[in-house]
Amino acid sequence: MAIINATTDSFAFSCSNISEAEILAMAAKAINEGADILDIGACSTRPGSTPIDEQEEWRRLQIALRAVRSTYPDAILSVDTFRASIARRAVTDFGVDIINDISGGIGEMFTTVAQLGVPYILTHNAPVDDSLPVSVQVIDNLIHKVDELHRLGVKDVIIDPGFGFNKSVEQSLELLDHLDDLRIIGLPILVGLSRKSMFYKPLGVEPTSEEALQATVEANRKALALGASIIRVHDVAINKPLTTKR
């Protein structure tokens, strides 16, 4: 899964002006390098960011989705949003294939994806503490939410352990070590590890650095060995061989 940022303030590799040409250049590069899914987001959720309003998120997404859908009609498109209304419009207006929700299902998201009938990426984004292993807390939270989704009629759920969301660097690294524990849920696992603070902060480097990239590649290699089905990345070419060697 390739990250396509239709944003100006993501922690790594934002757009400069969110134009069709800029979005298409990113999409073309990702597809040519072997991306299977394009994950398009228009609202940055980096730590410390202030989300843009719904109208601006949709304005940016329309630019990106119109450009990519018209140029690559057969591409599998995912939209990264925590707003149910945006998810509905993306699927209805542009035939988006997957909704990737980092919020863990706030508001009307669960009922909306149930009505839309599209695959849904459920991210763990709840506080964790030191009372139990991180993986145990993540599993407990996800199992309850997956059960709710299934009861609503959502058939295709992908789980994301939410590295960096409500977790310290140490907790995220511990979670990666025990990623295979999540297999007990019995659903595909997506990991979003690309250039995250759990790597660049301990290294004392910037997220766009070569060191952060190499740490990402090694972490993705480990995640795939421990049962991940999808890796979400900024850098497709260097990560693609990890998936083809499985």
Image: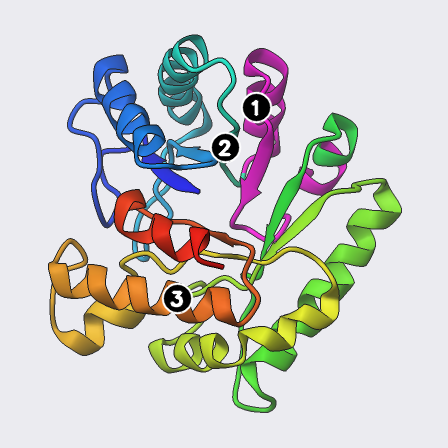
The label on residue 79 is: 2
Q: CA distance from mark 1 to mark 3?
A: 28 Å
The location of residue 17, given as percent across then percent down, is 18, 22
Of the residues shown, which amino acid type is indicated by label 2?
A: Val
Disc 1 target residue: 96
Of the two numbered discs 3 and 2 on the same chain, state the one appearing first in sequence: 2
Residue at the front extreme? 245
Q: Quadrant of the N terminus?
A: top left
The location of residue 166, given as percent across then percent down, is 46, 67
Residue at x 59%, y 75% (from the top left corner): 180
Secondary structure under tag 3 reads helix
Secondary structure under tag 2 reads strand
Q: CA distance from mark 3 to mark 2?
A: 25 Å
Q: On the image, which quarter does residue 185 sit in?
A: bottom right
Is residue 84 located in the magenta-colored stretch of the structure? yes
In front of the other: 1 or 16: 1
The location of residue 131, given as percent across then percent down, is 59, 91
| Lateral position of residue 225 relative to residue 3, left or right | right
In front of the other: 124 or 29: 29
Residue at x 71%, y 32% (from the top left corner): 112
Residue at the bottom extreme? 131
Q: On the image, which quarter does residue 42 sit in?
A: top left
The segment highlighted magenta reads 83-112
The location of residue 39, given as percent across then percent down, is 44, 36
Of the residues shown, which amino acid type is indicated by label 3?
A: Arg
Disc 3 target residue: 221
Residue at the top extreme? 70
Q: CA distance from mark 1 to mark 2?
A: 7 Å
| Lateral position of residue 142 relative to residue 9, left or right | right
Regarding residue 195, the answer to whether it shows in the image is yes
Residue at x 35%, y 21% (from the top left corner): 60
Q: Are the residues at dot 1 and dot 2 in contact (C-beta closer than 8 Å)?
A: yes
